[in-house]
């Protein structure tokens, strides 16, 4: 079973600061997804990365997929209180089930005004 | 209604009760999922239905019984639960097609279950 390690587990910052959160595994990802979950809601997909070395941008969010497809990072520039939430990475293992998505424990981000 | 809806949003039950969680997806997807989200643990996949057939059952105790009567509805029947089953139960749906692992799962808001 592939394990996804996310760090840090908790992060509390002031509005306007930059931050990076990480997702790592000892196994190769066939694909990797980042979700954000706000209190009282289910996770919402932010991005899917497939190719090693891929970089995707979504407004102030930058997602990077490692060259070896074993790690990924999410960088937020000039964080806003609306960015507060639980950031989850999820993946499927190469050669594994098409249906089984494995999640990390998440990084709980709080952006203070 | 749009997206994925779940009812009830909150449920408190005793260990001897029988209850059911309901999920409905309005997206025309062909796969539906039940997940369990506990404090300090990752989201755990419980069951997957594809085209109304159960295709994944991840060693879930028999006190949890899923049912998928059609492609839009998914139920999770609960009986004789334990306090450690208290968690947020999330339903999701997706359209499985094309490159494996790139489908988007759309989650409902979850049912917060407390077992006394």
Image (spheres, rainbow, N blue to C red):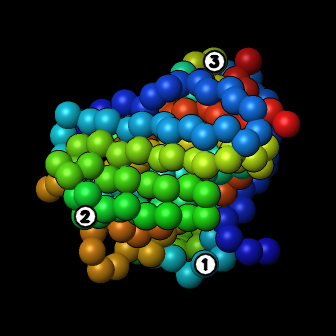
Q: Residue at x 76, y 39 (%)?
A: A15
- Residue A74 in the image: x percent, y percent? 48, 47
Left or right, B71 with respect to B102, comes to: right
Q: Secondary structure at mark 3?
A: helix
Hey, which quadrant is residue B11 in on the image? top right
Left or right placement of residue A35 versus residue B45 in this view: right
Which quarter of the figure is the N terminus of chain B placed in? bottom right
The subunit carrying tag 3 is: B
Q: CA distance from mark 2 to mark 3?
A: 43 Å
Read off the residue under disc 1: B27
Disc 3 marks which residue?
Answer: B83
Element under label 1? Answer: loop
Q: CA distance from mark 3 to mark 1?
A: 34 Å
Q: CA distance from mark 2 to mark 1?
A: 28 Å
- Give the camera-side residue of A80 and B27: A80
Asked whether the residues under marks 2 and 3 belong to the same chain, the reply is no
Foreground mark, 2 or 1, reads 2
- Judge from the rendering whether residue B12 lies leftward or rightward of residue A29; answer left or right: right
The residue tagged 2 is A51
Mark 1, chain letter? B
Label 1, residues with CA under 10 Å away: few <14, some 14-19, many ≥20: some
Percent position (x, y) of residue A52? 22, 58
Residue B5 shows up from this direction: yes
């Amino acid at each position: 079973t592939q394990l996804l390690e996310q760090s840090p587990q908790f992060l509390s910052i002031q509005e306007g600061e930059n931050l990076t959160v990480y997702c790592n595994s000892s196994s190769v990802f066939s694909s990797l997804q980042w979700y954000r979950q706000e209190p009282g809601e289910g996770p919402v997909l932010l991005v899917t990365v497939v190719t090693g070395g891929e970089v995707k941008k979504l407004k102030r969010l930058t997602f990077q997929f490692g060259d070896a497809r074993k790690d990924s990072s999410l960088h937020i520039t000039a964080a806003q209180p609306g960015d507060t939430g639980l950031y989850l990475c999820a993946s499927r293992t190469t050669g594994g089930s098409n249906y089984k998505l494995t999640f990390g424990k998440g990084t709980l981000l709080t952006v203070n005004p | 209604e749009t997206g994925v809806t779940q009812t009830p949003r909150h449920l408190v039950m005793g260990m001897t009760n029988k209850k059911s969680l309901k999920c409905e997806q309005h997206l025309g997807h062909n796969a539906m999922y039940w997940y369990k989200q506990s404090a300090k643990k990752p989201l755990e996949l419980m069951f997957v239905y594809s085209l109304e057939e159960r295709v994944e059952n991840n060693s879930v105790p028999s006190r949890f019984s899923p049912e998928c009567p059609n492609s839009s509805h998914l139920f999770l029947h609960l009986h004789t639960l334990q306090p450690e089953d208290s968690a947020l139960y999330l339903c999701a749906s997706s359209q499985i097609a094309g490159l494996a692992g790139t489908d988007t799962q759309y989650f409902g808001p979850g049912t917060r279950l407390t077992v006394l």
